[in-house]
Image: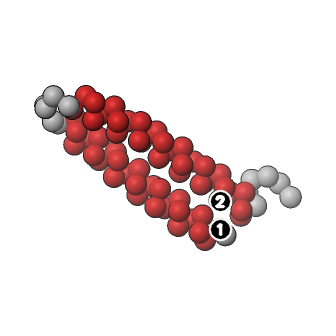
Amino acid sequence: MAVILQYAFYIALIGLVVILVLGLVNLTRTDASQASRSNKLMRLRVLMQAIAIGLLVALGIALGAIGGG
């Protein structure tokens, strides 16, 4: 279980970095839909961060670092 959570966490981190880079690239654009795209990428980044944090907490619980016992 911990190995699956670990891989999922790494995948979430890679996805988060990709979204961050896309957001930075989008800042250099000047087209009409840049603001809308920037807003969507920001929401996606926040969602991806929440997923990564949730996976990190689940990994801590699975390894016994969180929750005592």
Along the viewing direction, whichever of 3 and 31 lies nearer the viewer: 31
Farthest-out residue, left: 30
Packing grade of label 1 (10 A; few <14, some 14-19, many >=20) is few
Residue, far right: 69
Tell me the residue at 79%/52% (across/down).
67
Circle 1: residue type? Ala
Q: Residue at x 27, y 46 (%)?
A: 22
Q: What element carries label 1?
A: helix
Q: Are the residues at dot 1 and dot 2 in contact (C-beta closer than 8 Å)?
A: yes
Which residue lies under the disc numbered 2? Answer: 59
- Per the image, the residue denoted by label 1 is 2
At 60% from the left edge and 64% from the top edge, which residue is drawn?
Answer: 5
The residue positioned 53% from the left and 59% from the top of the image is 9
Residue 26 position in % (x across, y down) = 22, 39
For label 2, the crowd category at 10 Å Cα-Cα, with few meaning under 14, some 14 to 19 and many 20 or more, is many
Residue 36 appears left or right of 3: left
Image-based side of 67 in relation to 39, left or right: right
Label 2: state its secondary structure: helix
Identify which amino acid the numbered label 2 is placed on.
Leu
